[in-house]
């Protein structure tokens, strides 16, 4: 949510001259305060206070206004001590007379104070709050709030809320609905509240509402300036709720407009090659596959073929659980491009995965005349790389498998018709866009002619993810994608038994594992660290090197244990993976480099150490490495975990409770909230500060409907009605939406 910032003159010297050290608790605003004025323009906010604000990411007045209350509470009006009613929340002020720390052993204790006003004495006690010894001293004037009970002849409050007052005459408190801000120990909510209360009236008129008045009236929403006032200084619950709704809606509308405009742009401005499909081509492609496609895979193939026969770029997400068989679906699409004498690219997040895809696709294409190449960051020397790039540019290569190295400037395609992005959750929307934006077919031996109608050439794009998108989110972040879903697993996949155990069971687990491995199965053991180096906090963790040695010594008689991790030289890593694939290595100790895509069907056992340290999606990915059923044995995954936080406990319960990736994704979303789930920032989308998904889904749907209506009526937002909205969108997204800034 971003109020339209109007440029302001440089801060006046007079203002900074007044600025105190941060000690002065009652800031005053200067006359020409602007939304983008630094907070130090508030008199009373000096460098010290500014540093404290900076820790909350508040630098300007606008940031300050966007620092919204985390919650609110009704505060009772202040009364005299003699009028305190027992067992109800009361508020009083007085002078601290006596304080005392009563130790109760092992650092615990209680802090007692006596408060006196003109009418009587109130006793205060805080349990296990040793830090208060440095905070509350005799002679101070403080205000307290809490429930009082009679104790030793005086009213006593246990663990009351308190705040220091300047003096006994400081303004008395009325009953009110008070905002509670995210705060720090040195900068409590009350100080933030004061600063906002001071600044708000001076800048309220500058909060320009991007939405027209009749639109707001129809939505029963307050104008932006009112919404900020009601969020920060609400008179009652309803005002706070109305403010939240308006501010959340703003965010969601901007998000949905971004998506709708992008989608509109793709539909109207981009052209992609219409690929030819025939039964002969279809049969030709299928003869390459070693198995029959499942009905789910057939469905996805059908949707993709339908898309890429059109002259506009496909933008489709193929989602399906780990091991659900997405690769072959993508390969079908790539081969269709090749059958049309065009190129296809497959981009994956790690070198290991690129190498593996390259190997398995090469195997399927053995004996055909399709030319396939592998392009990753580290694998080629300069000359080899140049030669490969020349082949891609001249069209000698049909299919390129690679990492993000594919996105490098120097990689130019002859005629790229289709890009497959595997494991989408590792890439951002922006990387996806990077492919879409570039003019493909720019190579020297150019075959395809640019579209005559002036549209920009773009390849078809298929993104694949094994982190299923909860339906609620597919509307938001992935709203510009069409979605195909593969549910269920291909034949041959075996169900996985999952156990979550404590570290004390590890020995038992490894002995059982070694027994099964001795009979011909293979196992992965995943640990979080590579070696002992690194942060002190990581030293307690099992690391690949030491753990591999330990397993070899203690359980590995007659077995071969090997280790892989990201820092290993590529040739060495390939050698070990090859040995593991060939069953020459029996137990593979690894970091999460094996998380995505690694496919060794005979590996049916997995142990994950320190599982509480991994995210839910990651654990699910890891577990997906097994259950590939080649040896006919029942796969077993053991998570060794010592969860302490509530979040970690929930994660362990979820991973132990289901193997359904969709359920896990929903649970992950509910544990982490949407912000962290996909990291919207990384995806290049505006972060949601106010709106909460899934709670605000109805509001999201409203915003989505509005966004479509707006784009339908005026896609460039060039009309007067949406002039301000366009301005805010440009501020938010820069020029990625293709909106022109006409001032
Ligand atoms: P993911 O969706 O995780 O990328 P993969 O494409 O790697 O899954 O497929 C997982 C495994 O299932 C692979 O070994 C693949 O060969 C196998 N597989 C895929 N589709 C089928 C099918 N229709 N019949 C049998 N095996 C299949
Ligand atoms: Mg895959």
Image (cartoon, rainbow, N blue to C red):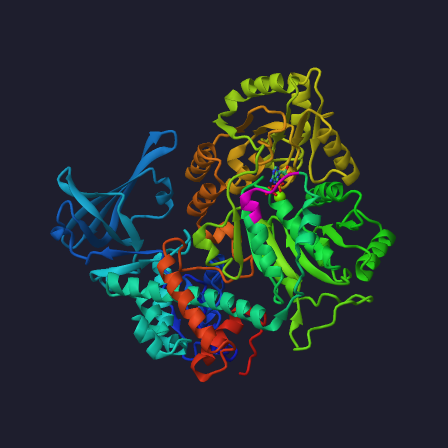
Quadrant in which residue 565 is drawn:
top right
Say which of 219 and 96 sits in front. 219
Residue 4 visible in image:
no
Q: Quadrant of ligand 1?
A: top right
- Residue 712: where, in percent of width, then height? 46, 74
Horizontal side, residue 471 vs residue 600: left or right: left
- In this orientation, which residue lies closer to the viewer: 56 or 708? 708
Q: Position of residue 543 (x, y in %)?
A: 64, 31
Image height of 711 relative to 511, above or below? below
Left or right: residue 394 compared with residue 186 = right
The residue positioned 80% from the left and 61% from the top of the image is: 393
Q: Quadrant of residue 353?
A: top right
Q: Position of residue 639 (x, y in %)?
A: 52, 29
Residue 633's place in the image compared with 174, above or below, is above
Q: Identify the residue at image location x=58%, y=32%.
A: 492
Can residue 544 be found in the magenta stretch?
A: no
Residue 210 in the figure: left or right of residue 553:
left
Residue closest to the eye, 447 or 67? 447
* Residue at the image point whose x is 71% and y is 29% from the top: 580
Q: Spot the residue most to the right.
A: 383
- 293 in the magenta segment: yes
Residues drawn in magenta: 291-298
Number of numbered discs on residues: 0
Q: Quadrant of residue 278?
A: bottom right
């Amino acid at each position: 949510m971003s109020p339209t910032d109007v440029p302001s003159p440089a801060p006046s010297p007079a203002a900074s001259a007044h600025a105190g050290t941060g000690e002065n608790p009652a800031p005053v605003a200067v006359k020409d305060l602007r939304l983008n004025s630094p907070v130090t323009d508030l008199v009373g906010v000096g460098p010290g206070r500014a540093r404290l604000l900076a820790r909350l990411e508040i630098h300007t007045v606008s940031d300050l206004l966007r620092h919204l209350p985390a919650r609110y509470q009704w505060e009772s009006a202040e009364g005299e001590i003699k009028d305190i009613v027992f067992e109800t929340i009361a508020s009083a002020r007085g002078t601290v007379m006596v304080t005392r720390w009563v130790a109760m052993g092992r650092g615990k204790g209680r802090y007692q104070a006596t408060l006196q006003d003109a009418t009587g004495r109130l006793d205060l006690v805080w349990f296990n709050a040793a830090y208060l010894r440095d905070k509350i001293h005799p002679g101070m004037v403080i205000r307290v709030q809490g429930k009082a009970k009679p104790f030793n002849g005086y009213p006593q409050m246990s663990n009351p809320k308190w705040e220091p007052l300047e003096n006994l005459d400081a303004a008395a408190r009325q009953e009110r609905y008070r905002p509670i801000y995210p705060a720090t120990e040195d900068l409590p909510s009350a100080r933030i509240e004061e600063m906002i209360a001071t600044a708000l009236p001076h800048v309220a008129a500058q909060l320009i509402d991007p939405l027209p008045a009749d639109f707001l009236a129809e939505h029963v929403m307050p104008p932006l300036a009112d919404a900020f006032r009601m969020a920060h200084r609400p008179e009652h619950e309803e005002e706070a709720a109305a403010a939240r709704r308006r501010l959340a809606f703003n965010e969601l509308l901007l998000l949905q407009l971004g998506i709708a405009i992008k989608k509109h742009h793709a539909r109207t401005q981009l052209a992609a090659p219409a690929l030819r499909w025939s039964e002969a081509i279809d049969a030709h492609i299928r003869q390459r596959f070693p198995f029959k496609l499942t009905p789910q895979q057939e469905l996805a193939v059908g949707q993709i073929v339908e898309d890429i026969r059109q002259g506009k770029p496909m933008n489709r997400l193929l989602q399906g659980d780990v091991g659900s068989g997405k690769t072959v679906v993508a390969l079908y699409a790539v081969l269709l491009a090749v059958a049309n004498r065009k190129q296809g690219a497959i981009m994956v997040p790690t070198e290991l995965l690129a190498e593996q895809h390259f190997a398995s696709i090469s195997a399927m294409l053995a004996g055909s005349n399709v030319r396939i190449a592998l392009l990753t960051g580290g694998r080629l020397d300069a000359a080899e790389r140049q030669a490969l790039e020349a082949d891609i540019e001249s069209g000698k290569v049909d299919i390129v498998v690679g990492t993000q190295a594919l996105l490098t400037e120097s990689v130019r395609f002859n005629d790229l018709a289709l890009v497959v992005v595997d494991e989408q959750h590792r890439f951002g929307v922006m990387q996806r866009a990077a492919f879409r934006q570039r003019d493909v077919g720019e190579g020297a031996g150019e075959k395809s002619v640019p579209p005559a109608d002036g549209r920009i050439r773009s390849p078809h794009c298929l993104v694949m993810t094994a982190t299923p998108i909860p339906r609620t989110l597919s509307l938001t972040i992935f709203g510009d994608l069409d979605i195909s879903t593969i549910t269920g697993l291909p034949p041959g996949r075996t169900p996985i038994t999952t156990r979550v155990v404590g570290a004390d069971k590890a020995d038992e687990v490894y002995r059982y594992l070694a027994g099964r491995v001795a009979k011909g199965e293979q196992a992965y053991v995943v640990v979080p660290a590579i070696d002992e180096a690194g942060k002190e906090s990581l030293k307690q963790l099992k690391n690949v090197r030491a753990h591999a040695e330990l397993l070899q010594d203690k359980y590995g008689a007659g077995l071969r244990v090997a280790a892989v991790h990201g820092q290993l030289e590529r040739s060495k890593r390939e050698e070990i993976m090859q040995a593991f694939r060939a069953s020459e290595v029996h137990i593979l100790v690894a970091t999460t480099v094996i998380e995505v895509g690694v496919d060794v069907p005979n590996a049916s056992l997995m142990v994950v150490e320190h599982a509480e340290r991994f995210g839910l999606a990651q654990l699910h990915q890891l577990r997906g490495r097994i259950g590939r059923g080649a040896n006919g044995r029942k796969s077993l995954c053991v998570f060794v975990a010592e969860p302490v936080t509530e979040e970690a406990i929930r994660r362990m319960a979820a991973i132990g409770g289901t193997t359904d990736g969709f359920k896990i994704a929903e649970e992950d979303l509910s544990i982490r909230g949407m912000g962290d789930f996909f990291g919207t920032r990384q995806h290049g989308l505006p972060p949601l500060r106010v709106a909460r998904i899934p709670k605000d889904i109805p509001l999201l749907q409203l915003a989505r409907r509005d966004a479509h209506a707006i784009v339908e009526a005026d896609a460039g937002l060039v009309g007067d009605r949406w002039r301000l909205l366009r301005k805010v969108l440009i501020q938010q997204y820069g020029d990625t939406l293709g909106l022109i800034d006409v001032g």
